[in-house]
Amino acid sequence: MEKFEVNILGCGSALPTTRHNASSQVLNIREKLFMIDCGEGTQTQLRRSKLKFSRLNHIFISHLHGDHCFGLIGLLSTFGLLGRTATMHIYSPKELESLMLPQIDFFCKGMDYKIEFHPFETQQPTLIYDDRSVCVETIPLKHRIPCCGFLFKEKATANHIKRDMIDFYHIPTYAINRIKNGEDYVLEDGTIVPNSRLTTPSAQPRSYAYCSDTIYNPQILEQIRNVDMLYHEATFAESEAGRAKETFHTTAAQAAQLAKDANVKRLLIGHYSARYDDESVLLKEAQAIFPNTTASKENLCIAL
Amino acid sequence: MEKFEVNILGCGSALPTTRHNASSQVLNIREKLFMIDCGEGTQTQLRRSKLKFSRLNHIFISHLHGDHCFGLIGLLSTFGLLGRTATMHIYSPKELESLMLPQIDFFCKGMDYKIEFHPFETQQPTLIYDDRSVCVETIPLKHRIPCCGFLFKEKATANHIKRDMIDFYHIPTYAINRIKNGEDYVLEDGTIVPNSRLTTPSAQPRSYAYCSDTIYNPQILEQIRNVDMLYHEATFAESEAGRAKETFHTTAAQAAQLAKDANVKRLLIGHYSARYDDESVLLKEAQAIFPNTTASKENLCIAL
């Protein structure tokens, strides 16, 4: 099966600690890298991950709180120093560009690559990226400032040819691609050989939803239904449910309830408040509602 | 003796690695903290150091390359989240303020403390900070952009009174402070008791010079002569002397030569190029010229 991996670079919240870096993840989808959020220290975590810098061309920023974007200027500057030439695409709420441009102009003079900003509006689910293997939609969230999650949906690959059947029916090479893409084959005598006899289906396309930062918001359920993995913030334990609501964050139990209600296959929690020395309380509260929950930690890599 | 400590938070150079953070140090001088440079990740290193955030009111930025200042916005933002109220003073080349203000306005809304910028010119040694225990002068350096090092000079404390002599001469309390500050005492019969009979001298005031980033520059010798400790960048080994010159950096041997020529007591090297997996080559080259050399590393604390 082709690669679809989630690499956790940081899963802390507003206050970085010595245990958790600020938010950042990198998806490796068929050897293309997609970064989600870029808190301070992300470039060092990326180096630690051993992911290839040159395969990263797209960065998605959920919202403009520092713990989700303060690492950008350092990352972009380092890529410049390393001689990058490929354009970097940054998808974010609109104010980021005007905040970054003066810094880029000053600190990244003479850099050999371009940075292209792709602002998105944050009220409606919007398709913001699309290539032949994956598309990305925003997931509007409810936080103190405009904020979106991201839904990564893999595209189906072509069916696998059954070589022995191709030989049996003497099917010519020129017809193979159509069959891979699902067409039946018509023999010279008019007999229709159904596609299912000639191919085996490719693997089911996979999907990943990233939802951080947000208050508990069941309006996202339809969009994240049945995803293979949901990353959802779980900043607080249930004992801090009031604080979660006030600060537009989610408790671990609420994240698990969403995972259950959306029938996702697996839940990954993160964005832990600095008050927890040990996140097992968060993990336990989530698992009580949705057993297939994993706690994020730095340098964790999960294959979907 | 009162505290005068140097805490290394980061001693890497332009490219942060998993072994070295970008430049930052904190001096603890009689329980006041002074930060020098603030590369990305400094706030986490400061947390690791266990130094008290509330004692830090002065930050000195040598120059506006990212590895010396990208950590500022995260640090300032975190202090705001933690409820800081005391004004933070930032001393730097002049462009920093205009670069930081839009970020501070956007990311630190509603913060309860002020940030005051104190731009300095970078061509002449200038007194930029002065209180009753320490003063700070800039040390003009030669780098690709305007850059200054910093000379921290402790002030002498009052002499120590010899209690038995005070009793012997029946010296009244009101005269004690003058004697502590060096005056002689005149008895009723006109006899002069010299200060040296009444006091023992206080500890010799200490001094620390920070010089990074710079090409080898003997013009600084007079200013750093006899300091108790010199931190000097030693980005490259002698085999890369050409590269050092091109990029306006110093080799370890050149740093050691400066330490020797300036008759400093101790040399601390740092700002290592990312190409060195092991800085022992730099340390050896420096020690061959100036034996009392120490290699910086993260979380090192040296008392002067």
Image (spheres, coloured by chain):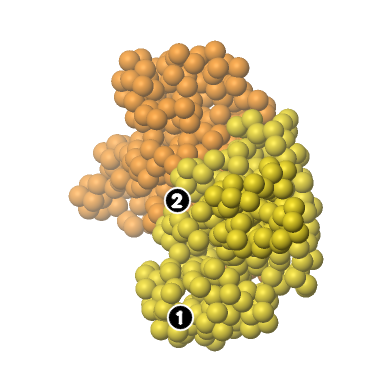
Chain colours: A orange, B yellow
Q: Which residue is mark 2?
A: A45
**Image vertical order of residue A275 relative to residue B143, above or below:** above
Q: Secondary structure at mark 2?
A: helix
Residue B24 picture location, percent across and down: 56, 57
Query: In the rendered image, is residue A222 in sight?
Result: no
Residue B25 picture location, percent across and down: 55, 56
**Image vertical order of residue B101 relative to residue A244, above or below:** below
Q: Residue at x 70, y 37 (%)?
A: B86
Residue A6 picture location, percent across and down: 40, 42
Residues marked 2 and 1 touching at CB (< 8 Å):
no
Q: Among all residues in the image, which is located at the extreme front? A: B189
In the image, B188: left or right of B274?
right
Q: Chain of mark 2?
A: A
Q: Secondary structure at mark 1?
A: loop
User: Dot 2: within a 10 Å radius of its alpha carbon, few (fewer than 14), some, or many (20 or more) residues?
Assistant: many
* Amino acid tagged 1: Phe
Discs 2 and 1 share one subunit: no
Of discs 2 and 1, which sits in the foreground?
1
* Amino acid tagged 2: Gln
Q: Which residue is mark 1?
A: B290
Q: Residue at x 54, y 86 (%)?
A: B242
**Depth order, front residue of A85/B181:** B181
Q: Residue at x 54, y 18 (%)?
A: A244
Residue B211 picture location, percent across and down: 60, 70
Numbered marks: total: 2
Name which quarter of the figure residue A147 lies in.
Answer: top right
* Mark sitting on residue B145: none
Give the alpha-carbon distance from disc 2 to disc 1, as whole Å.
36 Å
